[in-house]
Image (cartoon, helix red, strand yellow):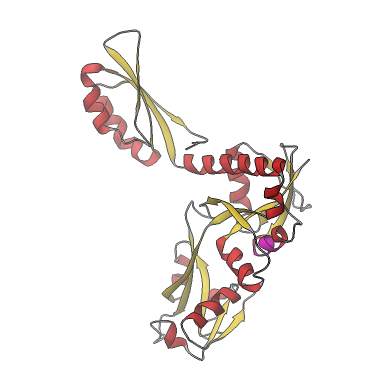
Amino acid sequence: MKLKLGIPKGSLQDATVQLFARAGFNLYVSSRSYAPGSDDPELECLLIRAQEMARYVADGVLDAGLTGQDWIAEQAVANPRRKVVPVADLVYAKQSFGKVRWVLAVPEASPAQCAKDLAGKVIATELVRVTEQYFQQRGVNVDVEFSWGATEVKPPVLADAIVEATETGSTLRANRLRIIDTVMESNTQLIVNEAALADEWKRAKIENLSLMLRAAIEAHGRVGLMLNARKDDLATILGLLPALQRPTVSPLSDDGWVAVNTIIEERTARDLIPKIKAANGQGIVEYPLNKIVL
């Protein structure tokens, strides 16, 4: 038996393949094929545009897939009866391990300060149905047009405002656009259909896959740190150490010494290690982490 899994094609593709590798699943993507290979014989992968993933999972073409909350919401507004079940929040994007914002933006010279100021205007976006719902909920009548791409270059000639996804806002600023509201936040989710959850083997496979993907994300940006310390110096050293839970302290063969093991943010290591050394820590080792299972 195999699990039919949708891998997002496009901007999330490379980040997803890298995440799977850190989770222990190697995917082999070819520019000539939409069916990536895998070193897990129980996975049957297919490259699908993130915008279409929820529909194919809901219809049972795929058992599971990875796509953003934005496209899940777009599918839910368009076809409320086609339901998918999110089983894991996987907070990563094409440029970072963070959420993406869909923002309402206008030209810097526009007098608009909020959604109501755009009544009767043209809004360009890829996220058409969610955008329509956003303005309807505020009682604002606008003309929402689908954009095939390069949305940020359309105002002010081809549209009065846009709803566009951004991680940092740099592209919007480069095109002299100003954000006036956030329509929604989105991050990648692992979604499944109810039929897959009802199958005992598929449910177990999905749960295991979810566990490993979440563990890889938890480990991102973190490192392990181990060292030896005299018992007399332990309290001082522990006071320096942040930890995911609490540092592990283990006795050594010499009764006067202990081993300390902990997890820290990688960016803090360069400042923390010299402080530990100054507090008489010995044999300090920083090592990479692939997965953290909480």
In front here: 102 or 60?
60
Give residue 55's position: percent from left, percent from top.
70, 63
Vertical comparison of 232 with 133: above or below: above
The quarter of the image holding the N terminus is: top right
Residue at figure coordinates x 24%, y 32% from the top left? 239
* Camera sees residue 279: no
Vertical comparison of 168 with 130: above or below: above
Residue at figure coordinates x 48%, y 33% from the top left? 289
Check residue 282 for magenta coloring. no
Q: Is residue 228 left or right of residue 292?
A: left
Residue at figure coordinates x 67%, y 68% from the top left? 81
Give residue 14's position: percent from left, percent from top.
62, 50
Question: Can you tell which quarter of the image residue 115 is in?
Answer: bottom left
Vertical comparison of 113 with 233: above or below: below
Magenta segment: 51-55
In front here: 292 or 27?
292
Q: Is residue 177 left or right of residue 70?
A: left
Give residue 5's position: percent from left, percent from top.
70, 49
Give residue 38's position: percent from left, percent from top.
72, 40
- Which is the main secondary structure of the residues drawn in magenta? helix
* Camera sees residue 114: yes
Q: Is residue 171 left or right of residue 1?
A: left
Question: Can you tell which quarter of the image residue 234 is in?
Answer: top left
Vertical comparison of 77 with 18: above or below: below
Residue at figure coordinates x 74%, y 39% from the top left? 42
